[in-house]
Amino acid sequence: MIGTIKNETATPFTQEQFAHLGDGQVAYVKPMRSEDVKKAFPQVQGIIPGMQLFALLAADGSPLMLTDSKDAAIANAWEHQLQTVSVH
């Protein structure tokens, strides 16, 4: 008999630790159409349909800023010492 292999799954993080991974360190730049802005930024009013915009989102997905320039979103992240990652 060769032996038995246990099927154990090692979890490096708890669910709560995983949920907060990147908090205060990482921000996501996400392109979005003006028609989709209400989902992430419900308080925004009067945006012209058909515009290409860029959202800066915290690591947990919460909205930080909305702009019409990817460079402005990245600059804002750097200003707040956040590492940026693009989301498609």
Image (cartoon, grey):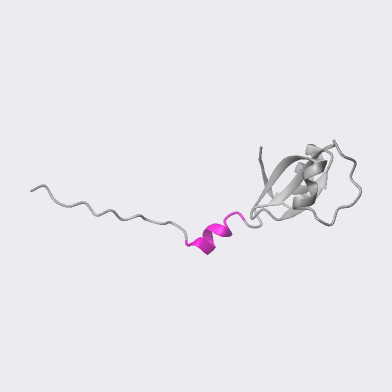
Name the side, left or right, on which 73 lies relative to 4: right
**Magenta span of residues:** 14-22
- Measured as percent of width and height from the top left, residue 71 is found at 79, 38
- Measured as percent of width and height from the top left, residue 1 is found at 7, 48
Q: Does the magenta portion include 17?
A: yes
What residue lies at 84% left-to-right and 57% top-to-bottom? Answer: 43
Name the side, left or right, on which 25 lies relative to 3: right
- Measured as percent of width and height from the top left, residue 6 is found at 24, 54
What residue lies at 50% left-to-right and 61% top-to-bottom? Answer: 15
- Measured as percent of width and height from the top left, residue 72 is found at 81, 41
Q: Does the magenta portion include 55?
A: no
Count all numbered tags in the image, as a single digit. Answer: 0
Name the side, left or right, on which 50 lies relative to 22: right
What residue lies at 80% left-to-right and 50% top-to-bottom? Answer: 38
Name the side, left or right, on which 79 lies relative to 59: right
Q: Is residue 87 above or below residue 64?
A: above
When asked about the image quadrant of residue 30, the answer is top right
What residue lies at 17% left-to-right and 52% top-to-bottom? Answer: 4
Q: Nearer the viewer, residue 55 or 45?
A: 45
Classify the position of the C terminus by image quarter. Answer: top right
